[in-house]
Amino acid sequence: MLENNDIFDLKNCRLCPRRCGVDRYKSQGFCGAPAQLTAARASLHLWEEPCIAGDKGAGTVFFTYCQLGCVYCQNYAISSQPQQTMQPFGKEISVRELTTSFLRLQSLGAATIDLVTPTHYAPQIIEALRLSRQGISGDKLTIPAVWNSSGYEAPEMVQAIAEDIDIFMPDFKYFDRKTALRYSNAPDYPERAMEAITAMVRAKGAPVFFPGLRSGHAADDCSQPHLKSGVIIRHLVLPGHRHESIALVQELYRRFGDGVILSLMNQYTPIAGAAYLTDFPELRRKLTKFEYDSVVEAALDAGFTNAFIQQGGTVSESFIPIFDGRGL
Ligand code: SF4
């Protein structure tokens, strides 16, 4: 039960490796999130891996605030800006309202419930998942729940939520402590993310697809098998960091082999006019094809066969969702 597990205690918040120990009913820790559940959008979202998006999209809920706070975040408006400006953003919702959003997304044909940046609201999200699976007015949640996170997680928190989450989809952003410090003020990110992902793989095991559907497919084909459970590890290759990315994918395969699905992303886009481009001039450009292809080649050479590889160009800012509270 949630109330019997100290990890869910928001009066002494230690939900993530920042372990602030603050009472979120009275103040805020590094992430800036109060105890009040706040989200920015709940809608069908096609820009996720095909095995969780299906044909109609993942049922994606974007939560406000983030405990990692990367300088280049594409969702800056909802992740770091509210914390930096102390201006609340998004819509305050109850657990019951979140439950209703989950069921509405399922009724629209969502393949999964895709929980984006969920860590700092883990207690409320798990409660909403349990409620929606028990059912409201005869309507029950039956589609998988995806924990779509930064990878900066506490292993005990991963263990506490593992029974309620079907698919873990963490990022593994950095392999070098200096990069983790520079871009996310989290020098321990490589160790903490590896511990968390190890706990995720231990909890979920190898990828399982719904019966009758095959695995192994191209990333741009949407008539694809739906994942039932497992771990997808995302890695966004950053400009100027291909050697770090190559070491990272090699280590992932050495540890987990094909017990995980790898998703290599090339979509880093400098946000025009963003303040971080002044302090981080190396991030003023997009990734080159050579940089991305060399990381893909390293992943395939390492042995990965379960991998999503992006084809074509990088995304533009217009693909960033509008965070207007719709669907909540
Ligand atoms: S979730 Fe937020 S308040 Fe809690 S430990 Fe992490 S950064 Fe600190």
Image (tube, rainbow, N blue to C red):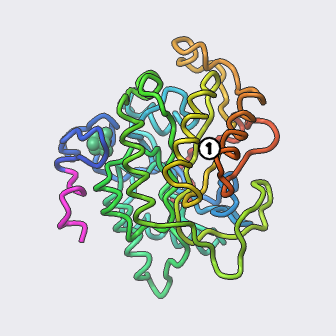
Q: Could you say which is closer to the camera, residue 1 or residue 319?
A: 1
Q: Identify the secondary structure beneath mark 1.
A: loop
Side of 189 where 289 appears, left or right:
right
| Prevailing secondary structure of the magenta residues | helix
Identify which residue is drawn at 31% across, 56% down.
Answer: 157
Identify which residue is drawn at 29% across, 38% down.
Answer: 18
Give coordinates of residue 4: x percent, y percent. 17, 67
Q: Could you say which is closer to the camera, residue 284 or residue 289?
A: 289
Indicate the amino acid at tag 1. Answer: Ile
Give coordinates of residue 177: x percent, y percent. 41, 27
Instruction: Look at the image and say whether residue 8 sits in the magenta stretch.
Output: yes
Q: Which residues are magenta?
A: 1-10
Where does the N terminus fall, quadrant-wise? bottom left
Q: Could you say which is closer to the camera, residue 149 or residue 233?
A: 233
Q: Is residue 177 above or below residue 128?
A: above
Q: Is residue 282 above or below residue 299?
A: above
Q: Is residue 95 above or below residue 311?
A: below
Q: Which residue is mark 1?
A: 322
